[in-house]
Image (spheres, grey):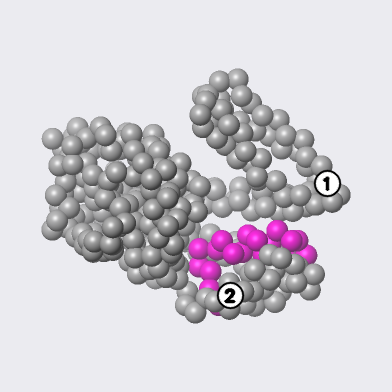
C-alpha cells in the first residue's frame, strides 16, 4: 500500500508489484477537497497483476453503486418492496458471479486467488474455481492461502440472497453480544428507545470501518440518545484487538461482540456480505436505510430527525 497523509488524514493506493513492471503515480494534493474526491490519484503501469485487480474492482464498484442507488429508490418510495428484492437479487448475483468468472478468465494471474478470498459468498463451492487456476498460481502464497481458507470453510457464511428478500423495510431482528467488560447485552425493537438507531458492523482489521468510526464519533456528539444512538457490533475474534481499536477510535457508544467473526449469527440475520455495513432503524423497529456513510449518513440523520420531531 502506498499511503499518503494529508491534513491529519490518510489515503492509500494498492500497488501489486512484479519484477518486470514499474509504476507512474500522479497525486493531486492541491487542497483537501480535491484530495478526497475520486480522482485524487492516477496510476499508469503495465503490471498485469494491477490491471486485473483494478479492472475487477472498478466493475465491482459500479455494481455496488447500482445497489446503493436501488436501495435509495425504495427509501423514497419510488419502487415497491417486490421490485427492490428483484433488483437486489440480480445485482448480488452479478457481484458474486464476477469472482467465479475471474478464475476462468485469468487462471494464470497471481492476483486472482488474492481477489477470490474476498468473495461475499465465499465457501467450499469455490473449490472448482481454485482447481481452474494454473499450477503456479495454486502453489503461490495466495494460492495456498485460498486453498487453506476453502478447507476451513465448513459452511457458506455469506448471504447470497437469491430467492430471498433484503432486510430493508423489515422489522429489526435481535442483536446480542457482550460488552468489552463482559456484560451481556440484547437489543430489539422493544428496547432501542431512540427515534433513530444506527447499527454499525465493523472490525479492527477493516480500514474503511476504522475511518468511519472517526466520523461516527463526531456524529454521536451531535444528538441526544433519545433522538439518535449508535450500537456497534464488532466482527473481531480477538478481544485485545477489538479493545485496542475501540480505544483508538474513541468508541464511547454501545459496543458489543460475540467474538465469532464471520461465523457469527449476524452474518445471515443482517445479510452481511462485506464491511463496512450498517442499518438504520426507526422508533417502531423498522429498518429504513442501509449502508449510509460519511456525508450521506450525516444528511440522512439530520433530514430524518427534522421531519420526525
Q: Nearer the viewer, residue 120 or 213?
A: 213
Q: Position of residue 252 (x, y in %)?
A: 29, 44
Q: Position of residue 162 (x, y in %)?
A: 43, 69
Work out which quarter of the rendered image holds the C terminus and state it.
top left
Q: Report the predominant secondary structure element of the magenta stretch.
A: loop
Q: Position of residue 110 (x, y in %)?
A: 74, 61
Q: Residue at x 64, y 26 (%)?
A: 28
Q: 295 left or right of 95?
A: left
Q: Nearer the viewer, residue 152 or 98?
A: 152
Q: Nearer the viewer, residue 143 or 119?
A: 143
Q: Which label number is shown at residue 242?
A: none
The question of residue 211 being in magenta is answered with no
Question: Label 1 neighbourhood size at 10 Å, few (<14), some (14-19), many (20+)?
Answer: few
Answer whether residue 103 is visible to the viewer in this image: no
Element at label 1: loop
Give the distance between the C-alpha atoms of the residues marked 1 and 2, in whole angstroms. 31 Å
Which residue lies most toward the right here?
A: 20
The residue singled out by tag 1 in the image is 21
The mark that comes first in sequence, 1 or 2, is: 1
The answer to whether marks 1 and 2 mark residues whose Cβ atoms lie closer than 8 Å is no
Q: Residue at x 17, y 53 (%)?
A: 192
Residue range (magenta): 107-124
Work out which quarter of the rendered image holds the N terminus and state it.
top right
State whether residue 211 is above or below residue 179: above
Q: 113 left or right of 31?
A: right
Q: Residue at x 16, y 46 (%)?
A: 194
The question of residue 108 being in magenta is answered with yes
Q: Position of residue 181 (x, y in %)?
A: 28, 58
The residue singled out by tag 2 in the image is 150
Q: Residue at x 42, y 70 (%)?
A: 263
Total number of numbered discs in the rendering: 2
Amino acid at each position: 500500500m502506498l499511503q499518503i497523509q494529508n491534513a491529519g488524514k490518510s489515503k492509500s493506493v494498492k500497488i501489486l508489484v512484479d519484477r518486470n513492471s514499474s509504476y507512474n503515480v500522479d497525486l493531486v494534493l492541491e487542497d483537501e477537497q480535491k484530495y478526497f474526491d475520486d480522482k485524487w490519484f492516477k496510476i499508469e503501469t503495465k503490471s498485469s497483476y494491477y490491471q486485473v485487480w483494478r479492472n475487477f474492482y472498478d466493475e465491482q464498484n459500479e455494481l455496488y453503486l447500482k445497489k446503493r442507488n436501488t436501495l435509495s429508490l425504495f427509501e423514497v418510495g419510488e419502487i415497491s418492496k417486490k421490485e427492490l428484492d428483484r433488483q437486489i437479487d440480480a445485482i448480488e448475483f452479478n457481484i458474486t458471479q464476477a469472482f467465479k468468472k475471474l478464475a476462468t478468465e485469468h487462471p494464470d494471474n497471481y492476483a486472482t486467488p488474492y481477489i477470490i478470498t474476498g468473495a461475499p459468498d465465499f465457501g467450499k463451492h469455490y473449490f472448482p474455481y481454485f482447481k481452474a487456476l494454473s499450477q503456479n498460481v495454486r502453489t503461490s502464497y495466495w494460492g495456498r492461502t485460498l486453498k487453506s481458507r476453502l478447507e476451513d470453510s465448513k459452511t457458506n457464511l455469506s448471504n447470497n440472497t437469491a430467492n430471498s428478500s433484503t432486510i430493508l423495510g423489515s422489522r429489526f431482528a435481535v442483536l446480542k453480544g457482550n460488552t468489552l467488560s463482559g456484560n451481556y447485552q440484547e437489543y430489539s425493537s422493544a428496547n432501542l428507545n431512540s427515534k433513530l438507531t444506527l447499527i454499525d458492523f465493523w472490525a479492527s482489521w477493516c480500514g474503511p470501518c476504522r475511518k468511519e468510526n472517526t466520523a461516527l464519533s463526531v456524529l454521536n456528539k451531535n444528538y441526544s440518545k433519545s433522538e439518535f444512538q449508535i450500537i456497534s457490533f464488532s466482527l473481531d475474534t480477538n478481544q485485545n484487538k477489538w479493545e485496542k481499536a475501540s480505544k483508538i477510535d474513541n468508541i464511547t457508544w454501545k459496543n458489543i461482540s460475540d467474538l465469532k467473526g464471520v461465523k457469527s449469527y449476524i452474518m445471515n440475520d443482517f445479510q452481511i456480505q462485506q464491511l463496512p455495513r450498517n442499518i438504520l432503524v426507526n422508533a417502531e423497529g423498522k429498518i429504513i436505510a442501509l449502508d449510509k456513510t460519511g456525508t450521506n449518513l450525516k444528511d440522512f440523520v439530520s433530514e430524518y430527525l427534522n421531519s420526525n420531531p
